[in-house]
Image (tube, rainbow, N blue to C red):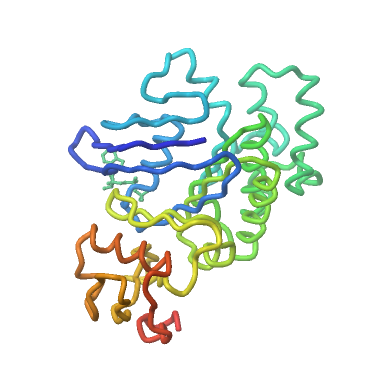
Amino acid sequence: MIEFKNVSKVYPNGTVALKNVNFKIERGEFVFIVGSSGSGKSTLLKTIFREELPTKGSITINDFNLNDMDKKEIPYFRRTMGIVFQDFRLIPTMSVYDNVAFAMRVIGASENEIRKRVPYVLSLVGLSSKARELPEKISGGEQQRAALARALVNNADVIIADEPTGNIDPEMSIDIVNLLNRINENGTTVIMVTHEHELVKKYNHRLICIDDGEIVSDIPKGAQNNNIIYRKKNDEEICRQKILSNYKKDKKSSVPVNKDIEKMNKEEKKKIIDKALSGTFELENDYSKYLEDGEK
Ligand code: ADP
């Protein structure tokens, strides 16, 4: 279980990257994290794997309290996490096999264990036939599969993927998310940052949206629907959850009619989003007029 309680992060230069973030991720969940560039996604991931410490608040990951961790514990904690980056970060001079084996060697696994485990993990990601290739000789999608194998090889409890599909073509992206799904079905928690709107819609996993360091919505698995509109701004996906401006007033709700959500403050926005999701009020059916060109 991953729990953030009132977590804020202020970098030494004064940038506030996370503001009072609260959430809980249970073991075995698959969570997408979306947000525009600079909204705090990487900082959030970095605080999860303890590359950064929060300025305020507490982070608990399984049995580890990240605020108050003995230095000796850090390597043990990190072994419970597998991390996948957008740019793969494979060692260019090592074969696919050796890149994966290296992750086991650094934690002191025996050659015997390595010989058994690496081929198995490579077969899980469909790379057995490329084991002896150098990263530059295989495609981007294959390199990402190798990186995924490396993240999995030490039996991580949590896989953290920071835009893992950012550098690969759309077909391969689906491949990678399908693999992450399979890993997740076997009980591993998966947290994936993405800009890819289509992937988020396709899988309907839990979706946490972050904007300007704050969590602006946390949509449970299976609950995404047309109530949530993604807009494109300057060609960049943003996660501002645009609940329609013309919602209908429900008798039970105190929501004002015809008020544009973009003009609301954060508290008001959150209330509206929560109400829309819980079905407290109805939204207008014709969503398309609120979408920008290219999304209709
Ligand atoms: P994202 O991953 O969503 O693009 P980041 O977490 O990288 O967002 O950044 C959030 C904010 O924190 C941005 O304003 C960014 O410029 C700032 N930031 C990130 N890392 C540092 C750092 N090491 N020092 C100072 N500011 C940083």
Question: Can residue 166 be seen at all in this image of the molecule?
Answer: no
- 172 relative to 68 in the view: left or right: right
x then y, percent, for residue 221: 54, 57
Image region (quadrant) for ligand 1: top left
Which residue is at 64% across, 48% downward? 143
Q: Is residue 134 above or below residue 66?
A: below
User: For this rendering, which residue is in front, 156 or 149?
Assistant: 156
x then y, percent, for residue 203: 59, 62
User: Residue 139 lies in what quarter of the image?
Assistant: bottom right
x then y, percent, for residue 54: 31, 32
User: For this rendering, which residue is in front, 5 or 66?
Assistant: 5
Q: Is residue 235 above or below residue 159?
A: below
Q: How many marks?
A: 0
- 280 relative to 199 in the view: left or right: left
User: Residue 290 lies in what quarter of the image?
Assistant: bottom left
x then y, percent, for residue 7: 31, 37
